[in-house]
Image (cartoon, rainbow, N blue to C red):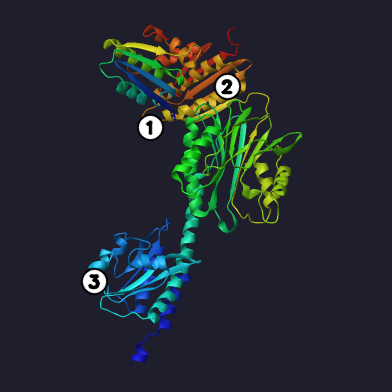
């Protein structure tokens, strides 16, 4: 069973969401719902912390791309924290995610 | 006239005795008691009869069988020990007679509704302990005599004996079923490692709280457990089941064995009353070269290697779980070279009557050698148990690192379901660790293999599903991965899809897809090069 932890830290109009564990085809849908629920409409900035994410596949990428697209429409800024050299960063770089949000 | 029709008390008692014989042994305990109660009613010429048995907590009596007042059972009457008519009998362990039931002061409304006028009850005593209460009642006022009480007590003693035996049989059967369902029937198959295990019930079918467990963790590590809940019978087996589940849950959350046992300890101290258990938990690294181990009062394992005498592993032993707050628990790293074998066991194997623990451990050390895991199990049982039944139950688990110098190809076929992805990754991580591929290459191959499998799961089959085959092999210094399905390829649907194939291409040197009527085969190659080159 694939397990991911989604921890939400709301701070005024900004939200930081830390995703840990693994995200793949099995749990991507659940993670997507958790992310949507974590972001209220009045949010102006979302920071995704992916430092504890040890595996991300294309199903997980799809969730992140969809999130980035939606936040752009809502004019909510998206920042992504992912340690250089990590497996998750490599997958994000390979998939061209930097085109929709900067990796910090 | 009276003499010819009168059935003597002796006759009636004999009728109760008969029922406790084997003729009715096929009856459920409730039905058996009901049958007995009919004969007790006739023996005492009473209108009602009921048996209440002490529940496992020992604080309440629960109506188990009744005649004339069936409502007691149907409504699941529970009486606190020490309160009311039946509660007093259990608490004081003596007969109680009520000549005229005071209906303003009866705990059990059913006695009132039935308008029972007089009552006589006696304790059910087996093996020196109260196990319940037997009582009879009449709808007309009656003065029960001490002779009546003696007669009912004689019947009660026989009923107590048969109830006790029947309940022990049931407990044993339940404990046995529980053990069977909880011990892994098939141990995980791990490339480069071999497992074998045994569980031997104690003397006279005495099952207990011993258990072993082996599970794959998402990180590619392998969790290994052996434990022993103090106590015997169904209760110990039930607690064992809970501890096993709790440990598995904590194992998913913590990477340090000492921390897992610390949390298990907290769980036991909070939720379990008067439970103590010894547990050893080890995590084998994906490379299989090393394991981290922590022991909560459990005997250290034996390490056997070719060319070296087998010996107990030198690990600090911390407090058993469920005792009290003690010093912080410790984790020890142990190297597991090729062909090394680790033998885990519970104390029932070495603690035998008429032999010291040290002598038992010496015998065990002599019996454990680095050999085929199943052979070692058989040999240990032959040498240490032989033909003498074990007093306490015994669990043992053998793990052996296979010493093939070459990397064994990974070959796995699983149902094409999202659920299997995490397990597939565990196997791939372990296999990659065995190849010695540098971390960046291993990470890329893991992602590519994950994508290829994901593709099969998402696109190859309709709702009926199918299977997915993954093979990985090392060809010189190139990792060759082949993922196959026997379904029909369907291109990606929806938005933001189809990224998988691109990822495989970018994570490999070369990729090849062959789609045909018989299914689709995705092959990709990745050469192991040093990081940065």
| Front residue (pair B346, B446) | B346
Around disc 1, counting alpha carbons within 10 Å, would you say few (fewer than 14), some (14 to 19), or many (20 or more)? few
Residue B115 numbered tag: 3
* Numbered-mark total: 3
The percent coordinates of residue B124 (x first, y second) are 43, 68
Q: CA distance from mark 1 to mark 2?
A: 32 Å
The percent coordinates of residue B461 (x first, y second) are 39, 27
Is the C terminus of chain A in the top left, top right, bottom left or bottom right quadrant? top left
Q: In the rendered structure, the residue with mark 2 lies on which chain? A: B
Rendering quarter of residue B93: bottom left
Between circles 3 and 1, the one closer to the viewer is 3
| Front residue (pair B205, B112) | B112
Label 1 element class: loop
The answer to whether B164 appears left or right of B367 in the picture is left
Label 2 element class: helix
Identity of the residue drawn at 46% across and 68% down: B125
């Amino acid at each position: 069973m694939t397990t991911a932890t989604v921890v939400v830290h709301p701070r005024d109009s900004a939200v930081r969401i830390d995703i840990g564990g693994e995200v793949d085809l099995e749990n991507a849908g659940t993670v997507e719902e958790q992310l949507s629920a974590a972001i209220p409409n009045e949010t102006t900035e979302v920071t995704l912390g992916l430092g504890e994410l040890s595996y991300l596949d294309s199903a997980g990428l799809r969730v992140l791309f969809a999130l980035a697209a939606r936040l752009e429409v809502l004019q909510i800024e998206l920042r992504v924290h992912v340690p250089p050299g990590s497996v998750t960063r490599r997958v994000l770089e390979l998939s061209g995610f930097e085109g929709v949000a900067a990796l910090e | 006239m009276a003499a010819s029709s009168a059935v003597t008390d002796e006759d009636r008692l004999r009728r109760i005795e008969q029922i406790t014989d084997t003729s009715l042994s096929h009856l459920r305990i409730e039905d058996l008691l009901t049958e007995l109660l009919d004969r007790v009613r006739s023996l005492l010429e009473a209108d009602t009869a009921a048996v209440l048995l002490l529940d496992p907590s020992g604080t309440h009596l629960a109506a188990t069988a009744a005649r004339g007042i069936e409502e007691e059972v149907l409504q699941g009457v529970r009486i606190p020990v020490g309160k009311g008519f039946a509660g007093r009998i259990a608490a004081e362990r003596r007969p109680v007679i009520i000549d005229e039931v005071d209906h303003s002061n009866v705990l059990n409304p059913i006695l009132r509704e039935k308008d029972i006028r007089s009552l006589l009850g006696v304790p059910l005593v087996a093996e020196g302990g109260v196990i319940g209460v037997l009582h009879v009642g009449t709808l007309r006022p009656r003065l029960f005599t001490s002779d009546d009480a003696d007669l009912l007590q004689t019947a009660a003693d026989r009923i107590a004996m048969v109830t006790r035996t029947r309940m022990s049989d049931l407990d044993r059967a339940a404990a046995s079923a529980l053990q069977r369902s909880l011990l892994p029937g098939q141990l995980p198959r791990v490339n480069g490692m071999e497992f074998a295990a045994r569980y031997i019930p104690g003397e006279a079918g005495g099952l207990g709280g011993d258990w072993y467990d082996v599970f794959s963790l998402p990180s590619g590590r392998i969790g290994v457990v052996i434990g022993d809940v103090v106590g015997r019978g169904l209760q110990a087996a039930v607690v064992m089941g809970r501890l096993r589940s709790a440990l598995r849950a904590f194992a998913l959350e913590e990477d340090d064995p000492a921390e897992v046992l610390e949390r298990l300890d907290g769980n036991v101290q909070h939720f379990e009353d008067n439970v103590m258990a010894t547990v050893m938990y080890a995590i084998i690294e994906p490379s299989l070269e090393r394991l981290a181990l922590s022991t909560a009062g459990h005997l250290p394992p034996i390490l056997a290697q070719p060319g070296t005498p087998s010996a107990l592993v030198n690990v600090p032993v911390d407090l058993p779980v469920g005792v009290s707050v003690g010093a912080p628990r410790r984790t020890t790293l142990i190297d597991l070279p090729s062909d090394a074998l680790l033998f885990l066991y519970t104390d029932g194997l070495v603690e035998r009557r008429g032999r010291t623990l040290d002598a038992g451990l010496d015998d065990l050390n002599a019996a454990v050698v680095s050999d085929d895991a199943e052979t070692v199990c058989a040999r240990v049982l032959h040498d240490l148990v032989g033909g003498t039944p074990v007093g306490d139950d015994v669990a043992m688990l053998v793990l052996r690192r296979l010493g093939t110098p070459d990397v064994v190809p990974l070959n796995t076929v699983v149902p094409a379901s999202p659920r299997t992805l995490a397990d597939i990754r565990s196997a791939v991580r372990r296999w990659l660790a065995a190849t010695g591929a540098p971390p960046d290459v291993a990470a890329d191959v893991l992602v590519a293999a994950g994508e290829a499998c994901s593709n099969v799961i998402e696109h190859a089959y309709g709702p009926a599903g199918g299977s997915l085959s993954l093979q990985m092999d090392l060809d010189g210094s190139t990792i060759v991965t082949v993922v196959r399905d026997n379904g029909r390829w369907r291109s990606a649907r929806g938005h933001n899809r189809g990224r998988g194939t691109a990822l495989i291409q970018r994570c490999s040197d070369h990729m090849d897809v062959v789609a045909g009527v018989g299914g689709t085969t995705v092959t990709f190659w990745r050469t192991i090069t040093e990081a940065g080159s």
